[in-house]
């Protein structure tokens, strides 16, 4: 949290706004001091105890009562837009919350000395994943088994473990091994997985050790117009319950209450990017869909097709999905096959695609462009290329408030107006928050 000492900006971990704490300076950067709470002198009523090691990765806000976390994340979005984007908001946006435990479908864990876990914040010191309660119980049990197998077989070459699960709990795994390690020694870790792959630090390529290292999600798309073409068939969703929001009222997570709708099938390699919260995945898709206008859709940074193919399943008249990553792009092409000519797949970078349609003089003025860039935000070339196509709507899904605020300023300067803005807490108990915004012109 932000504090000031003799006019100097101090970022204090382990503190809540309004508290008085004694803090220990860890390091000083340009114009800012980084400190760690040593003692809480006057505690906030929103501080909660018995949260284990809150400094363990993915758990750094666990000491704050969850409704207060959602309020703080709304304020973080508001502050970034005002300070970086020069876009003042009258009030913080609502932030949709998540169940705090067992939410995580994707995780990268580190390994050393027979242990597998997260790093403590700002260090390379391992800490156990189970006490943070981010992973499902079955996942934590599998990690215990992994450590037992590492000890039993004296395996010492494991550097990291990349996990990918689907909503239902199927699990694939990819291992990162040190140079010179024989990957075949790790096949025993495939027990309980759909598949296991590995890569060595001194060798290009990926070796499949067992099964198929991928998982499949089938997402329900409610409200599909009767008779609209889609991939899949009507089903009822199977998991879910109310989750809080910063506005103080519960939001029903879409995974779990009965409804009928179309289904889109998304297969993804364990290494492919995908949203990480099993409880909010369908809610995220439905919210993005609500911001998309009538007409064609272009999904930049499409990944394996979460947004673009869901919109195609819902009956969008024409969808272009763009993905430059070779792993995600391969899954995207396969996932798009059931839609035939209704979905156009472009396996190239966003910058290359925008240059291509510029050279072809393709008209996107009646389209909605969805952008879901990495934490670095859109490159200048990508943002300029998007603006030059003059789409009627831009739906921006951001995982970094600073780059979102920066890009918002550029869009507003280009004549777009910031409309609906909502936060989504895909990673409870962390400082991360997703921002979803609609820009129109």
Image (cartoon, helix red, strand yellow):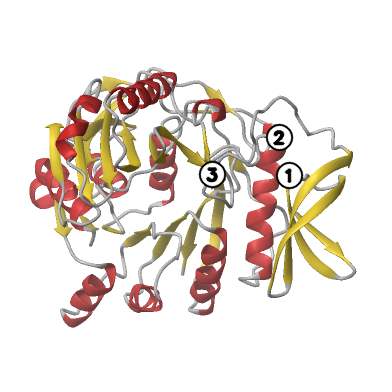
Q: Residue drawn 26% across and 40% down?
A: 174
Q: Regarding mark 3 in the picture, which secondary structure is present there?
A: loop
Q: Residues within 10 Å of mark 2 (few under 14, many from 20)?
A: many
Q: Tag count in the figure? A: 3
Left or right, 27 with reference to 157: right
Q: Return the residue at label 2.
A: 63
Q: Residues within 10 Å of mark 1 (few under 14, many from 20)?
A: many
Say whether disc 1 or disc 3 marks the residue closer to the N-terminus.
1
Disc number lying in front (1 or 3): 3
Q: Residue drawn 31% across and 70% down?
A: 365
Q: Regarding mark 1 in the picture, which secondary structure is present there?
A: loop
392 shown above or below 279: below
Q: Return the residue at label 1.
A: 14
Q: Regarding mark 2 in the picture, which secondary structure is present there?
A: loop
Say whether disc 2 or disc 3 marks the residue closer to the N-terminus.
2
Mark 1 and mark 2 residues within 8 Å of each other at the beta carbon: yes
The foreground one among 324 and 90 is 324
Left or right, 211 with reference to 142: left
Q: CA distance from mark 1 to mark 3?
A: 18 Å
Q: Quadrant of residue 11?
A: bottom right
Q: Return the residue at label 3.
A: 125
Q: Is residue 151 visible?
A: yes
Q: Residue drawn 28% across and 54% down?
A: 302
363 shown above or below 418: below
Q: CA distance from mark 1 to mark 2?
A: 8 Å
Say whether disc 1 or disc 2 marks the residue closer to the N-terminus.
1
């Amino acid at each position: 949290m932000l504090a000031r000492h003799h006019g100097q900006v101090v970022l204090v971990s382990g503190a809540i706004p309004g508290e008085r704490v004694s803090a220990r300076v860890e390091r000083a950067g340009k114009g800012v001091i980084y400190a760690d709470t040593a003692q809480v002198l006057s505690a906030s009523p929103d501080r909660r105890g018995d949260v284990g090691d809150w400094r363990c990765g993915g758990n750094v806000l666990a000491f704050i009562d969850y409704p207060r976390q959602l309020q703080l994340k709304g304020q973080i979005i508001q502050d970034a837009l005002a300070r970086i984007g020069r876009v003042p908001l009258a009030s913080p946006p609502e932030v949709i919350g998540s169940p705090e435990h067992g939410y995580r479908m994707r995780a990268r864990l580190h390994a050393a000395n027979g242990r597998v876990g997260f790093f403590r914040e700002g260090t390379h010191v391992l800490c156990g994943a189970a006490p943070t309660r981010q992973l499902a119980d079955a996942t934590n049990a599998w990690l215990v088994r992994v450590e037992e197998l590492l000890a039993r077989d004296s395996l010492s070459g494991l550097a990291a473990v990349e996990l990918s699960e689907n909503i239902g709990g199927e699990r694939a795994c990819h291992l990162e091994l040190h140079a010179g390690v024989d990957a075949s020694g790790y096949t025993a870790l495939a027990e309980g997985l759909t598949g296991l792959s590995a890569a060595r630090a001194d060798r290009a390529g990926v070796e499949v050790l067992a099964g198929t290292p991928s998982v499949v999600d089938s997402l329900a798309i409610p409200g599909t117009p009767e008779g609209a073409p889609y991939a899949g068939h009507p089903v009822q969703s199977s998991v879910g319950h109310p989750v809080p929001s910063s506005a103080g009222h519960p939001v029903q997570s879409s995974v779990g209450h009965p409804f009928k709708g179309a289904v889109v099938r998304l297969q993804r390699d364990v290494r492919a990017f995908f949203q990480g919260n099993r409880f909010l995945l369908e809610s995220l898709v439905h919210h993005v869909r609500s911001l998309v206008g009538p007409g064609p859709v272009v999904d930049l940074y499409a990944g394996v097709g979460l947004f673009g193919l869901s919109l195609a399943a819902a009956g969008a008249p024409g969808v272009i999905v763009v993905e430059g990553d070779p792993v995600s792009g391969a899954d995207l092409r396969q996932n798009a096959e059931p839609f035939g000519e209704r979905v156009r797949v472009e396996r190239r970078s966003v910058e290359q695609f925008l240059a291509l349609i510029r050279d072809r003089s393709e008209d996107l003025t009646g389209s909605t462009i969805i952008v879901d860039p990495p934490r670095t935000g859109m490159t200048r070339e990508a943002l300029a290329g998007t603006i030059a196509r003059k789409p009627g709507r831009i739906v921006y899904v951001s995982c970094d408030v600073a780059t979102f605020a920066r890009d918002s300023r550029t869009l507003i300067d280009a004549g777009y107006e910031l409309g609906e803005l909502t936060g989504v807490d895909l990673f409870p108990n962390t400082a991360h928050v997703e921002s979803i915004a609609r820009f129109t012109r």
